[in-house]
Image (spheres, helix red, strand yellow):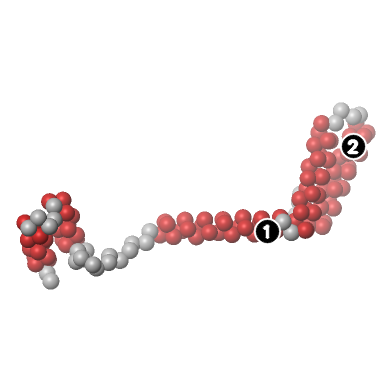
Amino acid sequence: MNVADEISKLADLKDRGALTDAEFEMAKAKVLSGSDTRVGVDQPSKTSWGKVVLFVFLGGVAIFFAIGFYASNTPEGKEQAKARAAIDLCWSDYKTSRLPLGPRKLIADTCDMMSKEFKEKYGVAP
């Protein structure tokens, strides 16, 4: 069916009261733009690439957090978290200590040693 026939059908539907003026104008615009206006014909969906990229990105973030959550709940992950907490506490004590320079140096050396052992054992800095 050509464009003129489609518009004629739409005008007939409008004249019989099956379409409002706004519906007629919208359908006519679709016909003129080349869109299929037949009833029951599904329009092909137009996938926005932005939505696809966002979906893939959010899926990647979710997988990243799931792996991190799993890794932190393994026995090694829990041990690593405890070692990090101990190193953080060591440096916190060093920073807040009011001890003389000699004992403070001992605390700093101990914290450095703990950090070095952590890096050797886990391959990353604490």
Which residue, as the protein is rendered here, is positioned at the far right?
A: 102
Residue at the image position 6 percent from the left and 56 percent from the top: 15
90 w.r.t. 97: above or below? below
Of residues 77 and 102, the one nearer the viewer is 77
Question: Could you give the CA–CA distance between mark 1 and mark 2, rounded to whole angstroms?
Answer: 38 Å
- Which amino acid does the dot numbered 2 rest on? Lys
- Which of the 4 image quarters holds residue 75? bottom right
Estimate how packed mark 1 is, as few (under 14), some (14 to 19) or many (20 or more) residues with alpha carbons within 10 Å: few
- The mark found on residue 105 in the picture is 2
> Residue 1, image x and y in percent?
12, 71
35 w.r.t. 104: above or below? below
> Residue 17, image x and y in percent?
9, 55
Of residues 94 and 42, the one nearer the viewer is 42
Q: Earlier in the sequence, mark 1 or mark 2?
A: 1
Residue under pointer 1: 70
Please, what secondary structure does the residue beneath circle 2 have?
helix
- Which of the 4 image quarters holds residue 5? bottom left
Horizontal side of 49 relative to 103 (left or right) equals: left
- Which of the 4 image quarters holds residue 95? top right
Residue at the image position 62 percent from the left and 55 percent from the top: 65
Of residues 3 and 115, the one nearer the viewer is 3
- The mark found on residue 23 in the picture is none
> Residue 7, image x and y in percent?
10, 62
